[in-house]
Amino acid sequence: MQDLYQLVDAVISSAVVMYAEQLGLAMLLGMVIGLDREIAGKPAGLRSHMLVSLASAAFALIALELVDSVGDMNDKVRIDPTRVLEAVVTGIAFLGAGAIIRNKGSVEGITTGASLWLTGALGVACGVGQLYLAGLTAALGMVVLFVVGKIEKMAARRTELIKDD
């Protein structure tokens, strides 16, 4: 009986560690993306991006757990984890759309909306255990936000200088 308790404890402990790793990385990567928005003073900043990524990872883990839990029960019961992912994408799209506003003829918040969507993808990737994919995606996202953002600002300044001449 003692061996059974040790086995159950080992299984539970390894699952908890795995979940903590996946959820923790999702939060960390969400923080990295959200930091750019926070520094830029955007309404959806650090906490928003961290929460979107964490929630996406949690939903992905829940979808995987549903598949695992039903798999042994009955051949007639089918679970489609892609439906959970569809719901996550739809919810994040709603958040992203809320970040985009029209102000006096110009549209603002598109990058914040896109970064929220990216953060959701990071969370899903972490949740399904694709940690390298999540890390690479976050790194490329940061290149877009920081490097391309700097290029855009330089181009805007140059355009202003040309207009002044």
Image: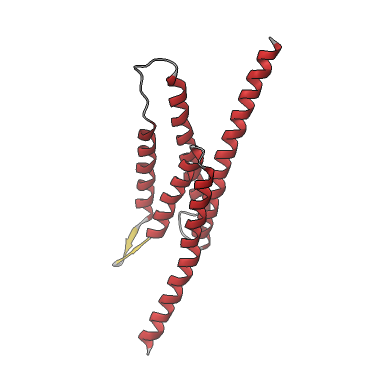
Which sits in the foreground, 48 or 17?
A: 17
Find the residue positioned furthest to the right.
2
Residue 14: x percent and y percent? 62, 29
Residue 28 location, x and y as percent?
57, 48
**77, 44: nearer the viewer:** 77
Residue lying at 34% horizontally and 17% vertically, measured from the top left = 76
Residue beneath the point at 35% across and 85% down: 163
98 relative to 12, above or below:
below
Residue 59 x/y as whole percent = 45, 35
**Farthest bottom residue?**
165
Q: Quadrant of residue 71?
A: top left
Name the quarter where the N terminus is drawn.
top right
Residue 6 higher or lower than 13, as above or below: above
Point out the image quarter for the C terminus. Answer: bottom left
Horizontal placement of 92 versus 138: left or right? left
5 lies above or below 58 = above
* Image height of 12 relative to 32, above or below: above
**Viewer-nearest residue: 120 or 42:** 120
The residue that appears at 49% across and 61% down in the rendered structure is: 143
Q: Residue furthest top?
A: 1
Residue 134 horizontal/vertical position (percent): 50, 47
Tell me the colour scheme of the image: secondary structure
